[in-house]
Image (tube, helix red, strand yellow):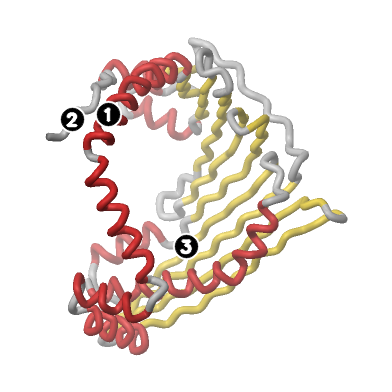
Amino acid sequence: MKKATAVLTALVLVFSVVMSTSATNFDALMAQFNPSYDFEMTMEISIESNIDDDELQGILALISGSSIGVSGTVDTINELALQMFYAMNVDVPALGIPMTFNYWIDMDLNDLENPTYLSIMETPEMLRLLMVLGGMPEFASQFFVMDMDELIVTMLEEMEGMMYEFGQMLLEYEEMIEEFEEMLEEILAAFHDEEALIALLDEFFPEWEEVLTEVLTFIEESVEFDFDFNFEPVFDGDTLTEIILNFACELVVTVDGEYIAIQFAFDFHVFNIGNPSTIIFPEINEDNSIDLLDLIMQDFPIEFVAPIAIN
């Protein structure tokens, strides 16, 4: 468990340093970012190990070389309305069956008495074939649809009453909440005061020095980590037109001659900012689609229950 904690700590520390170096520039970019754009994203992972464990090697063989690619378009109308399309390509070489899932989303919550929330998923042909071969031809539809307009209206009506009850409950426990806020302020303040932070750790986690020493020793002796990070905004004059982000890392953990090596690559490209591709929704009918929300509600009907006051 401590070894796993060490690896996680190393990743968090490295990622925090990397992200903090670009935070100021990123905030400045987001201030002029147009939320309508096209995008492409890929993730790839490779894992190898010399650990003599058949089950582990089987899992690694399944994962290693796998990749996910997503490309699509986001067309933001305003803060409460957007349309989106994206295609997700999943490739697991060990399975030998790459598949592509297409998704469309149409959302408009400007009029909460008449909202729109429609999601459509186009299933890959291979998945539809597996449904038929698996004896479930009724699910071998080209599209799965979730039209949540009426559900949203019902949820908002129920939530109005629930929020009132919740507000009444907060009033009853106002003194307790104030005490919690004071305690939280003390904890946050401690992070800006080294002596206060140490005193806080000593009180709630007396073993922190021993654990930290073990983690740092394990990282130094057993963990190798290398990474490459690139964040590149592209401008046309003063207008932001593209964002390119690349992150690659290699992590090797070695204990008593046994090792596990992980390579991970992430690439993200935002382009056509402010001028995205046109989204074309497919034609949906009873013959080519299944209402997934209806199926869910039949098997798991949703009942809204007012919150129970805590005495």
Looking at the image, which residue is at 22% across and 71% down? 1
Image quadrant assignment for residue 231: bottom right
The nearer-to-camera label among 2 and 3 is: 2
Looking at the image, which residue is at 46% across and 56% down? 66
Q: Amino acid at mark 1?
A: Gln
Image quadrant assignment for residue 258: bottom left
Q: Is residue 194 left or right of residue 103?
A: left
Front residue of 63 and 16 = 16
Count the labels in the image: 3
Q: Secondary structure at mark 2?
A: loop
Q: Is residue 64 above or below residue 6?
A: above
Label 3 belongs to which residue?
A: 45
Front residue of 130 and 151 = 151
Looking at the image, which residue is at 60% across and 59% down? 267
Q: Secondary structure at mark 1?
A: helix
Q: Is residue 235 left or right of residue 135?
A: right
Label 2 belongs to which residue?
A: 309
Q: Position of residue 123 (x, y in %)?
A: 49, 30
Q: Is residue 58 left or right of residue 68?
A: left
Q: Is residue 128 left or right of residue 72?
A: left
Front residue of 139 and 103 = 103
Q: Amino acid at mark 3?
A: Ile
* For marks 1 and 2 on the same chain, the one whose residue lies earlier in the sequence: 1
10 Å crowding of disc 1: few (<14), some (14-19), many (20+): few
* For marks 2 and 3 on the same chain, the one whose residue lies earlier in the sequence: 3
10 Å crowding of disc 3: few (<14), some (14-19), many (20+): some
Task: Give me the C-alpha separation between circle 1 and circle 2.
Answer: 9 Å
Q: Amino acid at mark 2?
A: Ala
Label 1 belongs to which residue?
A: 168
